[in-house]
Amino acid sequence: MSMKSEIKRKSLHLTSLTVPAVYLLFGKEAALFFVGLSFVMFIVLEPLRIVEHFRDRLKRKLGLYVDRQLIEIVEREIDIIAREHERRSIGAHIYFALAAFVIVYFFPRDIAIGSIAVATLGDAVAAIIGKPFGKHRFKNGKSLEGSLAYFVTALFILSFLIDLPHALIGALAGTLAEFYELPPDDNFSNQLAVAVTLYAFRKIAF
Protein backbone atom coordinates (compact mmCIF):
# COMPACT_ATOMS: atom_id res chain seq x y z
CA MET A 1 0.00 0.00 0.00
CA SER A 2 1.34 3.43 -0.98
CA MET A 3 1.93 6.14 1.60
CA LYS A 4 -0.96 8.17 0.18
CA SER A 5 -3.32 5.21 0.52
CA GLU A 6 -2.01 4.50 4.02
CA ILE A 7 -2.74 8.08 5.09
CA LYS A 8 -6.26 7.81 3.68
CA ARG A 9 -6.79 4.54 5.56
CA LYS A 10 -5.50 5.93 8.85
CA SER A 11 -7.56 9.11 8.44
CA LEU A 12 -10.64 6.91 8.19
CA HIS A 13 -9.51 4.91 11.23
CA LEU A 14 -9.24 8.12 13.25
CA THR A 15 -13.04 8.35 13.19
CA SER A 16 -12.83 5.60 15.83
CA LEU A 17 -11.89 8.33 18.29
CA THR A 18 -15.60 9.11 18.39
CA VAL A 19 -15.94 6.14 20.76
CA PRO A 20 -13.82 7.55 23.62
CA ALA A 21 -15.25 11.00 22.84
CA VAL A 22 -18.82 9.75 23.32
CA TYR A 23 -17.76 7.95 26.49
CA LEU A 24 -16.17 11.12 27.89
CA LEU A 25 -19.07 13.38 26.99
CA PHE A 26 -22.12 11.20 27.54
CA GLY A 27 -21.08 8.23 29.66
CA LYS A 28 -20.80 4.46 29.43
CA GLU A 29 -24.38 3.69 28.35
CA ALA A 30 -24.21 6.14 25.45
CA ALA A 31 -20.85 4.72 24.35
CA LEU A 32 -22.21 1.17 24.45
CA PHE A 33 -25.25 2.19 22.41
CA PHE A 34 -23.07 4.03 19.89
CA VAL A 35 -20.59 1.17 19.44
CA GLY A 36 -23.30 -1.49 19.48
CA LEU A 37 -25.34 0.30 16.83
CA SER A 38 -22.24 0.79 14.70
CA PHE A 39 -21.35 -2.89 15.00
CA VAL A 40 -24.84 -3.99 13.92
CA MET A 41 -24.74 -1.62 10.96
CA PHE A 42 -21.31 -2.90 9.94
CA ILE A 43 -22.52 -6.52 10.10
CA VAL A 44 -25.57 -5.75 7.97
CA LEU A 45 -23.58 -3.80 5.36
CA GLU A 46 -20.51 -6.05 5.23
CA PRO A 47 -21.93 -8.51 2.64
CA LEU A 48 -22.51 -5.56 0.30
CA ARG A 49 -18.77 -4.85 0.46
CA ILE A 50 -17.25 -8.31 0.08
CA VAL A 51 -19.86 -10.34 -1.85
CA GLU A 52 -19.73 -9.39 -5.49
CA HIS A 53 -23.34 -10.40 -6.19
CA PHE A 54 -24.73 -8.16 -3.45
CA ARG A 55 -22.36 -5.34 -4.37
CA ASP A 56 -23.46 -5.38 -8.01
CA ARG A 57 -27.14 -5.32 -7.03
CA LEU A 58 -26.54 -2.35 -4.74
CA LYS A 59 -24.65 -0.49 -7.47
CA ARG A 60 -27.52 -1.02 -9.90
CA LYS A 61 -30.05 0.32 -7.41
CA LEU A 62 -27.90 3.28 -6.42
CA GLY A 63 -27.33 4.01 -10.10
CA LEU A 64 -30.99 4.99 -10.37
CA TYR A 65 -30.46 7.87 -7.96
CA VAL A 66 -26.73 8.60 -7.86
CA ASP A 67 -24.30 9.37 -10.67
CA ARG A 68 -22.62 6.10 -11.71
CA GLN A 69 -19.24 7.77 -12.03
CA LEU A 70 -19.45 8.88 -8.40
CA ILE A 71 -20.27 5.32 -7.35
CA GLU A 72 -17.23 4.03 -9.22
CA ILE A 73 -14.98 6.65 -7.58
CA VAL A 74 -16.20 5.72 -4.08
CA GLU A 75 -15.79 2.01 -4.78
CA ARG A 76 -12.27 2.56 -6.12
CA GLU A 77 -11.27 4.61 -3.06
CA ILE A 78 -12.57 1.92 -0.71
CA ASP A 79 -10.67 -0.74 -2.63
CA ILE A 80 -7.46 1.32 -2.50
CA ILE A 81 -7.42 1.66 1.30
CA ALA A 82 -8.45 -1.94 2.01
CA ARG A 83 -5.78 -4.46 2.95
CA GLU A 84 -5.43 -7.37 0.55
CA HIS A 85 -6.99 -9.85 3.00
CA GLU A 86 -9.93 -7.50 3.69
CA ARG A 87 -11.15 -7.38 0.11
CA ARG A 88 -12.81 -10.78 0.42
CA SER A 89 -13.05 -11.16 4.20
CA ILE A 90 -14.10 -9.33 7.36
CA GLY A 91 -12.97 -5.70 7.47
CA ALA A 92 -11.01 -3.98 10.23
CA HIS A 93 -14.05 -1.93 11.28
CA ILE A 94 -15.89 -5.10 12.37
CA TYR A 95 -13.04 -6.21 14.61
CA PHE A 96 -12.54 -2.73 16.01
CA ALA A 97 -16.22 -2.22 16.90
CA LEU A 98 -16.46 -5.65 18.57
CA ALA A 99 -13.35 -5.07 20.70
CA ALA A 100 -14.45 -1.53 21.60
CA PHE A 101 -17.85 -2.82 22.79
CA VAL A 102 -16.21 -5.51 24.96
CA ILE A 103 -13.79 -3.00 26.45
CA VAL A 104 -16.38 -0.33 27.21
CA TYR A 105 -18.67 -2.94 28.78
CA PHE A 106 -16.16 -4.81 30.95
CA PHE A 107 -13.38 -2.37 31.84
CA PRO A 108 -13.18 0.77 33.99
CA ARG A 109 -13.68 4.15 32.33
CA ASP A 110 -10.06 5.29 32.26
CA ILE A 111 -8.80 1.96 30.90
CA ALA A 112 -11.53 1.77 28.25
CA ILE A 113 -10.96 5.31 26.98
CA GLY A 114 -7.19 4.93 27.09
CA SER A 115 -6.96 1.58 25.32
CA ILE A 116 -9.28 2.59 22.48
CA ALA A 117 -7.52 5.93 22.00
CA VAL A 118 -4.09 4.27 22.09
CA ALA A 119 -5.06 1.60 19.56
CA THR A 120 -6.45 4.25 17.22
CA LEU A 121 -3.82 6.97 17.42
CA GLY A 122 -0.85 4.72 18.12
CA ASP A 123 -1.48 2.61 15.06
CA ALA A 124 -1.93 5.68 12.85
CA VAL A 125 1.24 7.41 14.06
CA ALA A 126 3.26 4.18 13.79
CA ALA A 127 2.28 3.78 10.14
CA ILE A 128 2.78 7.44 9.22
CA ILE A 129 6.24 7.52 10.83
CA GLY A 130 7.31 3.97 10.11
CA LYS A 131 6.57 3.80 6.39
CA PRO A 132 8.53 6.84 5.17
CA PHE A 133 11.10 7.12 7.95
CA GLY A 134 11.60 3.52 9.06
CA LYS A 135 15.25 2.69 8.41
CA HIS A 136 15.65 -0.25 10.79
CA ARG A 137 13.32 -2.97 9.54
CA PHE A 138 12.38 -6.27 11.16
CA LYS A 139 11.52 -9.48 9.32
CA ASN A 140 7.78 -8.80 9.52
CA GLY A 141 8.17 -5.44 7.77
CA LYS A 142 7.71 -3.36 10.90
CA SER A 143 10.30 -0.73 11.75
CA LEU A 144 11.98 0.33 14.97
CA GLU A 145 10.99 3.92 14.23
CA GLY A 146 7.33 3.00 13.79
CA SER A 147 7.27 0.99 17.01
CA LEU A 148 8.90 3.84 18.94
CA ALA A 149 6.34 6.25 17.49
CA TYR A 150 3.56 3.98 18.73
CA PHE A 151 5.11 3.69 22.18
CA VAL A 152 5.60 7.45 22.61
CA THR A 153 2.06 8.16 21.39
CA ALA A 154 0.57 5.54 23.72
CA LEU A 155 2.58 6.81 26.67
CA PHE A 156 1.50 10.38 26.00
CA ILE A 157 -2.20 9.44 25.86
CA LEU A 158 -2.17 7.15 28.88
CA SER A 159 -0.21 9.59 31.06
CA PHE A 160 -3.25 11.89 31.04
CA LEU A 161 -5.54 9.12 32.27
CA ILE A 162 -3.50 6.97 34.66
CA ASP A 163 -0.27 7.09 36.65
CA LEU A 164 3.11 6.77 34.95
CA PRO A 165 3.92 3.12 35.86
CA HIS A 166 0.57 1.99 34.43
CA ALA A 167 1.06 4.21 31.39
CA LEU A 168 4.47 2.65 30.69
CA ILE A 169 3.12 -0.90 31.01
CA GLY A 170 0.09 -0.13 28.83
CA ALA A 171 2.20 1.58 26.17
CA LEU A 172 4.57 -1.40 26.07
CA ALA A 173 1.69 -3.87 25.78
CA GLY A 174 0.16 -1.93 22.90
CA THR A 175 3.50 -1.62 21.13
CA LEU A 176 4.12 -5.37 21.32
CA ALA A 177 0.58 -6.17 20.16
CA GLU A 178 0.95 -3.78 17.23
CA PHE A 179 4.35 -5.21 16.34
CA TYR A 180 3.26 -8.86 16.34
CA GLU A 181 -0.22 -8.19 14.86
CA LEU A 182 -1.88 -10.71 17.14
CA PRO A 183 -4.83 -12.67 15.68
CA PRO A 184 -7.61 -12.53 14.75
CA ASP A 185 -6.86 -8.94 13.69
CA ASP A 186 -4.67 -6.20 15.13
CA ASN A 187 -7.66 -3.84 15.32
CA PHE A 188 -9.18 -6.31 17.77
CA SER A 189 -6.12 -7.55 19.67
CA ASN A 190 -4.41 -4.17 20.06
CA GLN A 191 -7.20 -2.63 22.13
CA LEU A 192 -7.66 -5.73 24.25
CA ALA A 193 -3.93 -6.14 24.87
CA VAL A 194 -3.74 -2.65 26.35
CA ALA A 195 -6.96 -2.99 28.36
CA VAL A 196 -6.22 -6.46 29.79
CA THR A 197 -2.63 -5.53 30.67
CA LEU A 198 -3.62 -2.32 32.43
CA TYR A 199 -6.40 -4.04 34.35
CA ALA A 200 -4.19 -6.97 35.40
CA PHE A 201 -1.36 -4.65 36.43
CA ARG A 202 -3.77 -2.56 38.47
CA LYS A 203 -5.03 -5.63 40.29
CA ILE A 204 -1.52 -6.90 40.98
CA ALA A 205 -0.14 -3.51 42.03
CA PHE A 206 -3.00 -2.72 44.35
Image (cartoon, grey):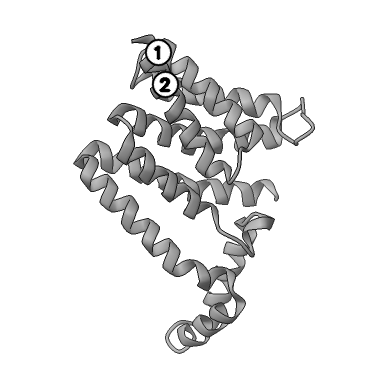
Contact, CB < 8 Å: mark 2 with mark 1? yes
Residue at the spot 66% in from the left edge and 32% down from the top edge: 130
Q: Is residue 89 above or below residue 160?
A: below
Estimate how packed mark 1 is, as few (under 14), some (14 to 19) or many (20 or more) residues with alpha carbons within 10 Å: few
Residue marked by disc 1: 204
Q: CA distance from mark 2 to mark 1?
A: 6 Å
Q: Is residue 206 above or below residue 6?
A: above
Locate residue 7, reporting x and y percent: 58, 46
Locate residue 129, reporting x and y percent: 63, 32
Residue marked by disc 2: 200
Q: Quadrant of the C terminus?
A: top left
Locate residue 113, reporting x and y percent: 34, 33
Estimate how packed mark 2 is, as few (under 14), some (14 to 19) or many (20 or more) residues with alpha carbons within 10 Å: few
Residue at the spot 75% in from the left edge and 35% down from the top edge: 140
Image quadrant assignment for residue 150 = top right
**Horizontal side, residue 21 vs residue 98: left or right:** left
Q: Amino acid at mark 1?
A: Ile
